[in-house]
Each structure stands twice: as structure tokens, then as C-alpha cells.
Amino acid sequence: MSIDMRKIYNFYPVEPAPSAANLPTGGDLYYECLDCAAVVNSVPFIKAACVCGNLQGGAGKLSVKNPAQVRVVRGKLK
């Protein structure tokens, strides 16, 4: 099952954009995969992944295969 996070949140890019080598995490920070356009929480407590497999996580940890293909965004409830 996949949840389209854009139906729940408005996303805004974090400025200045953090480097791919040091991606920040936080409850209101999300990673947008630039390959498949999926959005995943930076600290997912339920199993979450993007379609292409670049972002995968759960239990509060997220692994990023290609950090250069990630945009850090801040989510605000609609």
C-alpha cells in the first residue's frame, strides 16, 4: 500500500539546500526522490519506500542509495 503524501501535506524545499553528503532528519523533514517523485519521511516509523528503491526505511531509520537524487523538503499539513 502506498500513500500519496502530497494529498496530506504541502511541501516546500529546504533553503539553502543541504549537501547530499549531510542530509538532515526531523519530524517535519521529508525526502523527495528526484528519480520517481515519491516523498518519504526522513524518520519513517512505519515501513516506507519510494517506487524506484532509492529511499527505503522503517523503525525510525531511512537508507538513501543515491543522495544526489534527493531533495529535502519541509512538510506542512494542508
Image (tube, rainbow, N blue to C red):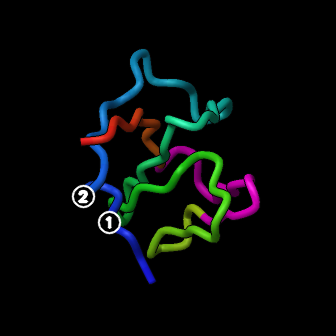
The span picked out in magenta is: 56-69
* Residue 19 highlighted magenta (yes or no): no
**Residue 1 position by quadrant:** bottom left
Res 59 quadrant in image: bottom right
Which amino acid type is marked by label 2? Lys
- Tell whether 24 sits left or right of 40: right
Residue under label 2: 7
Dividing the picture into quarters, in which one does residue 53 lie? bottom right
Label 1–label 2 contact, CB within 8 A = yes
Q: Element type at marker 1? A: loop
Q: 50 above or below 22?
A: below
Which numbered disc covers residue 4?
1
> Residue 68: where, in percent of width, then height?
52, 44
Identify the element where label 2 is drawn.
Answer: helix
Q: Is residue 3 left or right of residue 60?
A: left
Task: Point out residue 12 in the picture as x, y percentages from the top left corner.
Answer: 30, 32
Q: Is residue 77 above or below residue 24?
A: below
